[in-house]
C-alpha cells in the first residue's frame, strides 16, 4: 500500500484526521509536526529548519510521497519554493509537494484566473501570499484577513466566518472565478464548502480537500468524497 509522509506545520489537533477520512483506505499516512505556535513572519521563516529535518525523517521511512504542509512555503515565492522542493527531491529521491503547489493545481483544474482569498494572517503576510499567487499566474482581486489571534483560529465561529466570506464575495461577485481559503487552522471552514460554493457559484479551494485530491492524483487514485466541496467531489 502506498504511504504518504505528511508534515503538519504545528501539533494542533484535527487536520490529519480530516485528511484520512478523505483518502482511500489503501493510502496510509505517516505523521510529523513542526512547532509553529504564534504565526509571525519570523516564526514561519524559522520553520524551514524544522521542515528540513522532518522531510529527512520521512524519507528515511521510505514513504512514496512527502507532503510538507502549511503556509510557510508561500513566503518563499514560487521560484523559492520550487528550488527548495527540487533540492529535497534530488537529495531523497522521493516526490514532494506543498500546499501552495496543490492549491495552485486545484485552482488551475477549475481554470480560475481571477481569485479572492481569505486567511487568518495579518496584512503584511497576506501581501506575500498575494505575490506567490500572482507569480503562479492569477489575478488576486483581494486577500482578506479575518481578525483572530493565530492561536484562536481553530475556534473561529462558523457564523462569523460566513459573514466575513459573504462580504468578501459581495465585493467581487462579478469578477471572481474562485475563493481560496488560505491556511489549515480554521476548522469550521471544512464543513462550509458546499454551502459557500452553492451560494457564490464558484469553487472554494480548501487546504484538506486539495491535499486529498493532489495525493490521489499523484498516486493514481480517483475516489470522490461528498460533502467537502467540488474539488474532492468532482475530482477534476
Image: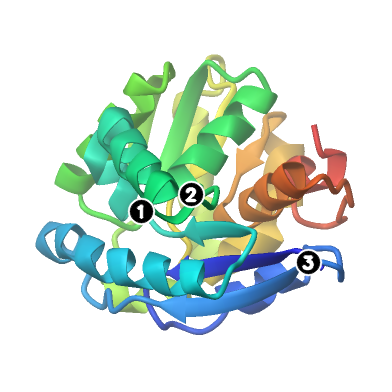
Contact? badges 1 and 3 (CB < 8 Å):
no
Taking depth in this image into account, of 222 and 118 the one nearest to the observer is 222
Where 31 falls versus 46 (above or below)? below
Taking depth in this image into account, of 29 and 178 the one nearest to the observer is 29
Q: What is the secondary structure assignment of the residue under circle 3? A: loop
Asked where in the image residue 51 lies, by quadrant, the reply is bottom left
Q: Is residue 113 left or right of residue 70?
A: right
Residue labelled with disc 2: 99
Asked where in the image residue 197 lies, by quadrant, the reply is top right
Q: Which residue sits furthest left?
A: 42
Which tag, 1 or 3, sits closer to the chain's start? Answer: 3
Q: What is the secondary structure assignment of the residue under circle 2? A: helix
Can residue 148 be seen here? no
Contact? badges 2 and 1 (CB < 8 Å):
yes
Of labels 1 and 3, the one closer to you: 3
Residue labelled with disc 1: 71
Residue labelled with disc 3: 27
Which tag, 2 or 1, sits closer to the chain's start? Answer: 1
Taking depth in this image into account, of 93 and 97 the one nearest to the observer is 93
Where 137 falls versus 206 (above or below)? above
How would you rate the neighbour count of disc 2 (Cα within 10 Å): few for under 14, some for 14-19, many for 20 or more? many
Q: Is residue 209 left or right of residue 227?
A: left
Q: On residue 186, which mark appears?
A: none
Taking depth in this image into account, of 6 and 87 the one nearest to the observer is 87
* Residue at figure coordinates x 66%, y 45% from the top left: 214
Q: Is residue 92 left or right of residue 28?
A: left
Quarter containing the N terminus: bottom right
* Residue at figure coordinates x 67%, y 57% from the top left: 192
Amino acid at each position: 500500500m502506498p504511504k504518504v509522509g505528511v508534515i503538519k506545520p504545528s501539533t494542533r489537533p484535527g487536520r490529519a484526521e480530516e485528511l484520512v477520512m478523505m483518502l482511500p483506505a489503501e493510502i496510509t499516512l505517516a505523521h510529523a509536526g513542526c512547532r509553529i505556535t504564534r504565526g509571525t513572519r519570523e516564526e514561519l521563516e524559522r520553520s524551514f529548519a524544522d521542515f528540513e529535518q522532518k522531510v529527512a525523517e520521512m524519507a528515511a521511512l521510505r514513504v512514496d510521497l512527502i507532503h510538507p504542509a502549511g503556509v510557510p512555503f508561500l513566503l518563499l515565492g514560487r521560484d523559492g519554493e520550487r528550488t527548495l522542493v527540487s533540492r529535497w527531491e534530488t537529495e531523497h529521491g522521493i516526490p514532494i509537494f506543498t500546499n501552495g503547489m496543490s492549491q495552485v493545481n486545484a485552482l488551475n483544474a477549475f481554470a480560475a484566473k481571477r481569485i479572492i482569498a481569505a486567511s487568518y494572517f495579518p496584512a503584511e503576510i497576506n501581501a506575500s501570499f498575494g505575490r506567490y499567487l500572482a507569480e503562479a499566474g492569477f489575478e488576486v482581486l483581494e486577500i482578506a484577513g479575518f481578525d483572530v489571534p493565530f492561536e484562536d483560529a481553530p475556534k473561529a465561529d462558523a457564523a462569523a466566518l460566513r459573514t466575513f466570506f459573504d462580504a468578501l464575495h459581495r465585493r467581487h461577485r462579478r469578477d471572481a472565478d474562485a475563493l481560496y481559503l488560505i491556511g489549515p487552522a480554521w476548522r469550521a471552514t471544512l464543513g462550509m464548502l458546499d454551502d459557500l460554493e452553492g451560494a457564490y457559484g464558484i469553487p472554494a479551494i480548501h487546504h484538506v480537500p486539495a491535499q486529498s485530491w493532489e495525493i490521489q492524483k499523484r498516486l493514481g487514485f480517483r475516489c470522490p468524497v461528498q460533502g467537502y466541496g467540488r474539488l474532492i467531489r468532482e475530482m477534476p
